Amino acid sequence: SDSQAKARVGSDFDVRMMRRCLELARCALGRTSPNPLVGAVVVKDGEIVGEGFHPRAGEPHAEVFALRAAGDRARGATVYVSLEPCNHYGRTPPCSEGLIAAGVAKVVVGMVDPNPLVAGGGIARLRAAGIEVVVGVETEACQQLNEGFVHRILYKRPLGILKYAMTLDGKIATTSGHSAWVTNQDARGEVHQLRAACDAVIVGGNTVRLDNPHLTSHQMEAHNPLRVVMSRHLNLPEDARLWQTAQAPTLVLTEVGANPDFQKFLLKQGVEVVELTSLTPDQAMAHLYERGFCSVLWECGGTLTASAIAQGAVQKILAFIAPKIIGGSHAPTPVGDLGFTNMTEAIALERVRWRVVGSDCLVEGYLPQI
Ligand code: AOF
Ligand code: ZN
């Protein structure tokens, strides 16, 4: 079987400690970009004597907090960390040196850091100092947690996640555009969690006009993503909820010179406006990459979704399917025209998983990397 094929690294105890690292890492969900989510645990004589996580870019790394909490007990201890300790002077000094100075005996690493500044260098430095290093405990879970960070490093773009909710007959709204609500409360709760984990959520002008969404995570203390609207002509309503920026920030991406009066109105509301030379999904993603973002959630209608897919701005799809029928041969569907005429052109998702969420079904998968 699959689990037999992959030789497991680490004891039950190691796995338990690494899972604790991941739990700690998640305390900073949505707040660390452009940095990864990292958790660390210091274990001495089978007991946890220090824990830490990376709270946000510019602040100390997970290992620093865990070592501080452990104090003298770090000497001869085992440190578990979900990402390879860094070996470079960035905004903070190298964790490899910190671990060596603390006199730890062993380091257990969840995954190698894909950052070319680190990329195995941290592990090599620790080994050169005589510290035992084990790599590969709960690696898949570690990679999953930081898939946005990894994608950002490898492709110089944030990870694009497309989320939509449709009826069993494949509609995202009625013919008149009404869409509240396709899915049940549980599925909506899941979307709010998803938003809390993302750096930005993008919609087009149509969604603002038709749905007047909040696009927040609706959870106490949870991170709210930057709400991004892509609009070429800025013919948008003045009373949209997205212009209320007290709860969460909003960015409007438009083209150079578009509707100066409405731009002034937006700025007065505290909405940021950025004029791009060409307003395309890829240029939007390029801009969000420059802002240091790791993951971006596309929650737009079919037209913008189709062009985001066509331009490679979407890597992952989450489709909520509600067992309801609304019919309507002109009712909007999740993905507009992709120009395909033959079934052989269909984009086949990979690593597909199905899950029941309340009374709805969630299908998750990845687009093949082009
Ligand atoms: C670790 N532990 O908790 C994190 C690491 O600018 P800096 O100094 O914060 O460095 C950022 C890079 O360090 C980041 O891109 C990633 O490679 C690594 N993050 N490393 O040992 C941590 N957050
Ligand atoms: Zn570090």
Image (cartoon, rainbow, N blue to C red):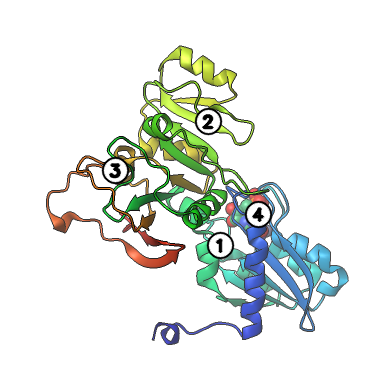
Residue 97: image location, x then y, percent = 73, 63
Q: Residues within 10 Å of mark 3 (few under 14, many from 20)?
A: many
| Quadrant that contains the N terminus | bottom left
**Of the two numbered discs 2 and 4 in the rendering, the one whose residue sits closer to the viewer:** 2
Q: Camera-side residue: 214 or 125?
A: 214
Q: Which residue is mark 1?
A: 113
Mark 3–mark 4 distance (CA, rounded to whole Å): 32 Å
Q: Which residue is mark 2?
A: 241
Give the residue at x 40% y 29%: 209
Give the residue at x 33% y 38%: 304
Mark 1–mark 2 distance (CA, rounded to whole Å): 40 Å
Residue that protrudes farthest toward the left in the picture: 342
Left/right of residue 37 with respect to residue 360 in the rendered view: right
Give the residue at x 72% y 49%: 59
Residue 27: image location, x then y, percent = 67, 57
Residue 337: image location, x then y, percent = 22, 42
Q: Earlier in the sequence, mark 2 or mark 3?
A: 2
Q: Camera-side residue: 39 or 246?
A: 246
Q: Which residue is mark 4?
A: 28
